[in-house]
Image (cartoon, helix red, strand yellow):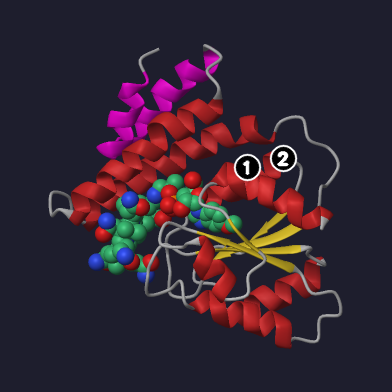
Amino acid sequence: MNLTQLYDAILNGKLEEGIAVTKTAIDEGTDPQVIINDYMVKAMEEIGARFESGKAFVPNLLMSARAMKGVLNLLKPLLTAGTTTSAGTIVIGTVKGDLHDIGKNLVASMLEGCGFEVINLGVDVSSDQFVEAVRKHHADIVCMSALLTTTMNYMREVTAAIQASDLVLKPRVMVGGAPLTEAFAAEIGADGYSSNANGAVILARRLIRA
Ligand code: B1M
């Protein structure tokens, strides 16, 4: 199976083509991690670079995002197969003002796939929504995502709101997203940072054990 066809399908926003190629790749036993990391994420990086250099526009981003999400939905059951007991409960969301959810959903799927119970709050999530979800689901970890330099600062507000809340058992906080750094995570009082979905799983396991 030539998966560059999948890369092209995501890059050009062709959902149906992407699904057809992916179905064949799955049937041939290709590792879903390879499909995602080596082709799908790379295509999203390329469309982002084209957008930055004025060679692609918001409708192109939306088409690529639609294709990416559709194919991810197809792969999600393969990531979550075979897990039975919960490794811990994680509340995840993209912070207020930010509508990017592809990376966050990928992180959520990986965490689910590795046995965590994941409460996905979606995008544009306020500090109150995070705190209330922790209370409702007795979450061990809050996981925040941001893709914009303008919205990443809101993570500071969420960590502060968690500390200021009346929650008896405060959840650990982990953060990620393209503009973030380890130093930023430390500065806002988060317990950990990861640059990618696999790292988020390793970090979550470490925070649960700590
Ligand atoms: Co927008 N966008 N976007 N966008 N977009 C970026 C982020 C941008 C870098 C593009 C660019 O200029 N090159 C730029 C941000 C610049 C900046 O802030 N410095 C940008 C901009 C400017 C904007 C708008 C302002 C554009 C406009 O309207 N003029 C606007 C903002 C809207 C808003 O949020 N309020 C906007 C809108 C959009 C769309 C809606 C069109 C669409 C999003 C659709 C969707 O998500 N449903 C979109 C897209 C698709 C992108 C790019 C092209 C791709 C993002 C993506 O999905 N990547 C992006 C450019 C880029 O990233 N190269 C861009 C694939 C995904 C798998 O990677 O999300 O990075 P990522 O997730 C990774 C890691 O970051 C990490 O793991 C994931 C998997 O490895 N990770 C975590 C993420 N969260 C984590 C949490 C963790 C751990 C790891 O917790 C522990």
Tell me if 52 is positioned left or right of 201 in this view.
Answer: left
Depth check, front residue: 193 or 161: 193
Name the residue beneath numbered marker 1: 110
Q: Are marks 2 and 1 in contact (CB under 8 Å)?
A: yes
Quadrant observed for ligand 1 in the rendered image: bottom left
The secondary structure that most of the magenta stretch takes on is helix
Q: Check disc 1 and give the amino acid type.
A: Met
At 53% from the left edge and 39% from the top edge, which residue is drawn? 73
SS under mark 1: helix
Q: Is mark 1 within 8 Å of ligand 1?
A: no
Based on the picture, tell me whether residue 26 belongs to the magenta stretch.
yes
Magenta stretch in the rendered image:
3-27
> Which residue does the numbered mark 2 point to in the structure image?
114
Q: Quadrant of the C terminus?
A: bottom right
Q: Quadrant of residue 93?
A: bottom right
Q: Where is residue 184? Give x, y as percent.
A: 50, 69
Q: Quadrant of residue 130?
A: bottom right
Q: Residues within 10 Å of mark 1 (few under 14, many from 20)?
A: many
User: Quick check: can you spot residue 177?
Assistant: yes
Q: Residue at x 79, y 71 (%)?
A: 136
User: Dot 2, crowdedness within 10 Å: few (<14), some or many (≥20)?
Assistant: many
